[in-house]
Amino acid sequence: MNETITRFGFPATLLREFEHWVVLVRPAQPTLGSLVLAAKSDATDLSALPADAFAELKLVTTAIESALKDFVGYAKINYLMLMMVDPHVHYHVIPRYEGARTFADIEFTDAGWPKVPDLGSAIALSEDQLSALKEQLVPRLG
């Protein structure tokens, strides 16, 4: 796994591994159910990924959207490819919703709704909270 993937807590944050991608629970949650979708390659440019990675992206995003719709009931979903600090190809997957969602006695609001997500308002989860979130998401991702 590349350095970007390990910086997001792999293997502890791994939800599902595909041939070209991994889906990780995002340790800091700007909204409940926020994920990281990361390419397993060492590519730092989207265009450098192999064609098979793009084809597999259909399968991966379908699994993500189905899982998050079931878990958090989002109204919109944002895939943010920022790659400013972590250079390898990855997306921050942010489910968007009006109001609040509660999980593990924590209230998660979408501070940016209905505009740009407010990543600065993310809630850093403890190891126990991350584990509990993983328990909910892993079965939904298939």
Image (cartoon, rainbow, N blue to C red):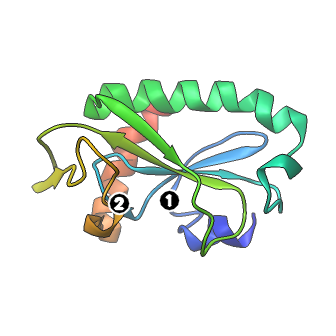
Give the residue type that dot 2 points to.
Leu
For image coordinates 78% across by 40% down, the residue present is: 19
- Residue placed under numbered mark 2 in the picture: 130
In the rendered structure, are the residues bearing label 1 and label 2 in contact, judged by CB atoms less than 8 Å apart? yes
The circle drawn on residue 116 is none
Give the mark nearest the N terminus, 1 or 2: 1
| Vertical relation: 120 (above or below) 132 | below
- Residue placed under numbered mark 1 in the picture: 13
Q: Nearer the viewer, residue 21 or 43?
A: 43
Residue 117 position within the rendered picture, expressed as x and y whole percent measured from the top left: 33, 52
Q: Secondary structure at mark 2?
A: helix
Give the residue type that dot 1 points to.
Thr
In the rendered structure, the answer to whether residue 109 lies left or right of residue 58 reads left
In the rendered structure, the answer to whether residue 114 lies left or right of residue 22 reads left
How many labels sit on residues?
Answer: 2
Q: Is residue 142 at least partly visible in the picture?
A: no
For image coordinates 26% across by 28% down, the residue present is: 73
Report, in whole angstroms, how far the alpha carbon at label 1 lies from the one at label 2.
Answer: 7 Å
For image coordinates 83% across by 63% down, the residue present is: 42
For image coordinates 20% across by 55% down, the residue present is: 111
Residue 10 position within the rendered picture, expressed as x and y whole percent measured from the top left: 59, 64
Q: Nearer the viewer, residue 46 or 63?
A: 46
Q: Is residue 15 at least partly visible in the picture?
A: yes
Residue 108 position within the rendered picture, expressed as x and y whole percent measured from the top left: 18, 52
**Residues packed near mark 1 inside 10 Å, few (<14), some (14 to 19) or many (20 plus):** many
Q: Quadrant of residue 137?
A: top left
Q: Secondary structure at mark 1?
A: loop
